[in-house]
Image (tube, helix red, strand yellow):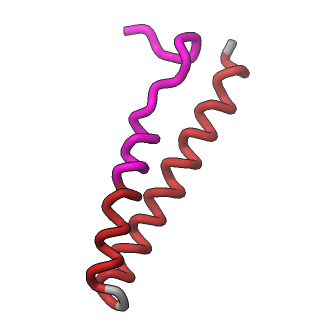
Amino acid sequence: MVKFCLPQKISKMILGLFFAFATLGLVISGVTVLPVIGFIVAVPFGLISFYFFRAHLNDQCELES
């Protein structure tokens, strides 16, 4: 059962990290190059990143508490 959860966990982590790094890049560009546009675009990317880090896996992959 663990091997079925691994692709979900990897894809969730990759998407979360991608959007986190995109957010960081947009914030840096917002500070240096595009002050308003960089921050406006960075906020939705940050929210998407947060969503992927908090997204639940299917019921078989969730840890029971």
55 vs 16: above or below: above
Horizontally, residue 27 falls left or right of residue 3, namely: left
Magenta residues, start to end: 47-65
Q: Residue at x 55, y 18 (%)?
A: 58
Q: Foreground residue, 10 or 29? A: 29
Total numbered badges shown on the rendered structure: 0
Q: Foreground residue, 30 or 20? A: 30
x and y percentages locating residue 22 in the rendered image:
47, 66
Q: Foreground residue, 11 or 3? A: 11
55 vs 62: above or below: below
Q: Quadrant of the N terminus?
A: top right
Q: Residue at x 55, y 39 (%)?
A: 12
18 vs 10: above or below: below
x and y percentages locating residue 9 in the rendered image:
59, 33
Q: Is residue 53 magenta?
A: yes
- Res 26 quadrant in image: bottom left
Q: Is residue 57 magenta?
A: yes
58 vs 14: above or below: above
- Res 64 quadrant in image: top left
Q: Residue at x 36, y 66 (%)?
A: 42
Q: Quadrant of the C terminus?
A: top left
Horizontally, residue 2 falls left or right of residue 54, namely: right
Q: Residue at x 37, y 45 (%)?
A: 50
x and y percentages locating residue 15 in the rendered image:
55, 48
Residue located farthest toward the bottom when viewing the structure as drawn: 33
